[in-house]
Image (cartoon, grey):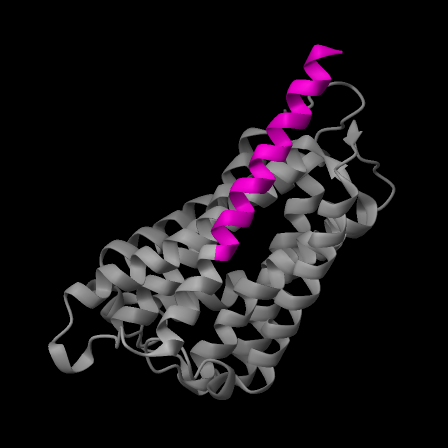
Amino acid sequence: MFDISENNPRIPAFLRFVVLVECGVVLAAALLLFLFPDLAKTLWAWDIPPFNARFVGAIYFAAYIPLVIFWFNPYWTPGRLILWMIFVFTFLIMIVMIFHVDAFAWDRPATYLVFWPLYFFLPVNSAVFLFLSRKVTIANPVTMPSFWQMFLAFFAIFAAGYGIGILITPETLTRFWPWSIDAFHGRIYASAFITPAISAWILSRRGGARSEYFIFGLNLLTGGILPIIGTLLTNINMPPDRQINFDAFGTWLFFLLFIVAGVLGVIQITLAFHKSNQMEMK
């Protein structure tokens, strides 16, 4: 699945160190937000309600998996695709931060010691290494079925369109969600749609290696299933007047949106393993 031959160059030591730091920060944030939302409300960089906390925690868990694979497998394939994911995710968050400075709790160390420094450094760092690695080619690319490549392009257009729409009119396009979404959180969530959209577009246009398709599938799977689990887990502990309405069409549309992402992730992982087995049999 993962190519460690001479055809697949290693990433620079500095970039690997940065990825290690990212792994630590993202895992800590995911654990705090997803498992301890009440504690996160007092420690996080902004005042984050329980539903929002677990949703952001789910996003961070989905982001952590490609990161930790990148660190353990420090090669440009699949590293360069993951670096694109890092750049898109952190750049979008940085832009939202600039437009919503007033949303942050500036009396908390997490705001000025962790969140703001990292989300200005990471997109710049990613952009630099993407430029430096622009001539690196994919190690042992595989050919996916043509229908799947077309589907990836369709997914990319749909997910990017929805994500960009949330950036523009966040409260309108999240109105069907099971809980109320303010403009700041809505724009933060846009990164969860645009990031996999960019990955899908890259893979649909140039193809990819088995490891790239596998990581993309894992990202879709975790990013699809964990938001549902987080929403249901939060709902259990909420007072009756703040619980989600299971009779509302929007609630089930929300669940369907993420179930589809999770199913697509399973299909992509299966296809990646199928291609891996085919190459091993040759």
**Which residue is more in the foreground, 206 or 67?**
206
* Residue lying farthest to the right in this orientation: 135
Asked if residue 212 can be seen in this view, the reply is yes
Q: Position of residue 175 (x, y in %)?
A: 43, 84
Q: Is residue 131 left or right of residue 246?
A: right
Q: Is residue 82 magenta?
A: no
Q: Residue at x 77, y 31 (%)?
A: 142
Q: Please determine whether, in this image, residue 202 is positioned above or below residue 93.
A: above
Q: Residue at x 49, y 88 (%)?
A: 172
Q: Position of residue 60 (x, y in %)?
A: 43, 55
Q: Please determine whether, in this image, residue 278 is positioned above or below residue 84.
A: above
**Quadrant in which residue 201 is drawn:** bottom right
Q: Please determine whether, in this image, residue 257 is positioned above or below residue 179.
A: above
Viewport quadrant of the N terminus: top right
* Residue lying farthest to the left in this orientation: 239
Q: Residue at x 57, y 64 (%)?
A: 193
Q: Is residue 188 left or right of residue 225?
A: right
**Quadrant in which residue 87 is drawn:** bottom right
**Which residue is more in the foreground, 80 or 166?**
166
**Quadrant in which residue 75 is drawn:** top right
Asked if residue 139 can be seen in this view, the reply is no
Q: Position of residue 191 (x, y in %)?
A: 56, 66
Secondary structure mostly taken by the magenta-highlighted segment of the chain: helix
Viewport quadrant of the C terminus: top right
Q: Residue at x 70, y 11 (%)?
A: 281
Q: Which residues are magenta?
A: 260-282
* Residue lying farthest to the top in this orientation: 281
Q: Please determine whether, in this image, residue 24 is positioned above or below residue 126.
A: above
Q: Position of residue 182 (x, y in %)?
A: 40, 85
